[in-house]
Amino acid sequence: GNSVTQMEGPVTLSEEAFLTINCTYTATGYPSLFWYVQYPGEGLQLLLKATKADDKGSNKGFEATYRKETTSFHLEKGSVQVSDSAVYFCALGVRDYTGANSKLTFGKGITLSVRP
Amino acid sequence: DGGITQSPKYLFRKEGQNVTLSCEQNLNHDAMYWYRQDPGQGLRLIYYSQIVNDFQKGDIAEGYSVSREKKESFPLTVTSAQKNPTAFYLCASNQNYGYTFGSGTRLTVV
């Protein structure tokens, strides 16, 4: 089956620090990979995605590279801001045999707090 | 603007009662999903629907029911059979991996 494993949290950083959040996966077929962000009391927003091996997703200074050889999709940002404080979810989706849209499988999420 | 509307934002239920959470989308997406979020457990799939009048159980469907009579609407009923319903519930829709989430409903059993 499909599964996503995220590093344990929470993570607390000072502003302008470097961020890495690890994500590894197991999947049948050829998954697409996603990072979602959730701000307090809100739903999830797509942060970035990659649909095939070696693709790099990027958005708002965040980056993640789809590494098939290590089955990983680690999230990085060179300089975090207080406004980046949120919960971050790694997720994967695999289309079913009909090619139809797939349900996403999520990691447990990790809370990031950035101090001024 | 297109999006997903979940209502209400907060909901209180007495033990033994059924309660229905609303989810409406105007994105013309075929697929819709209900997830449950608990602290430290991420998101778990309750039910999903890939087309009108059809839906499938997710990983934790027991104690829940859904309907999909219209493309725009995918209501979730939390029945009295759900042993621990207090949680944050998220609805989502999808078209070719363009997932959009609603802002959630926080259900509390009192």
Image (cartoon, grey):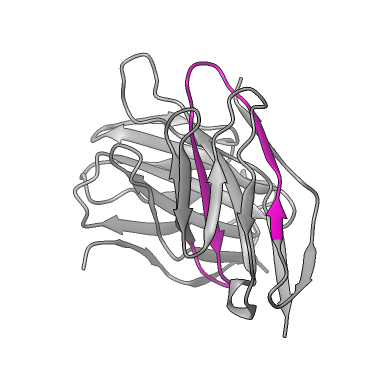
Residue A105 picture quarter:
top right
Among all residues in the image, which is located at the extreme bottom? A116
Residue B58: give x, y in percent of width and height: 52, 32
Report if residue B79 is visible in the image.
Answer: no
User: Measuring 59% from the left and 36% from the top, which residue is drawn there?
Assistant: B62
Q: Front-most of B80 and B73?
A: B73
Can residue A52 be spotted in the picture? Answer: yes
Q: Nearer the viewer, residue B16 or B68?
A: B68
Is B25 in front, or is A25?
A25
Specify whether A106 is left or right of A17.
Answer: left
Q: Which stretch did the figure color magenta? A: A19-43
How many marks can you see?
Answer: 0
Along the horizontal axis of the image, is B73 left or right of A61? left
Q: Position of residue B3 (x, y in %)?
A: 28, 61
Instruction: In this rendered view, identify the residue nearer to me: A66 or B11.
Output: A66
In magenta stretch: residue A22? yes
Residue B2 lies in the magenta-colored region: no
| Vertical comparison of A56 with A2: above or below | below
Residue at 50% x, 31% y is A54
> Where does the N terminus of chain B fall, quadrant-wise?
bottom left
- Quadrant in the picture for residue B22: bottom left
B56 lies left or right of B10: left
- Residue appearing at x 78%, y 63% in the figure: A11
A109 relative to A12, above or below: above
Location of the C terminus of chain B (image quadrant): bottom right
Instruction: Name above or below for residue A78 compared with residue A67.
Output: below
Residue at 31%, 20% (x, y): give it: A99
- Measuring from the top left, give residue A10's x and y in whole percent: 79, 61
Report x, y in % for residue A1: 61, 19
Extreme residue in the front direction = A78
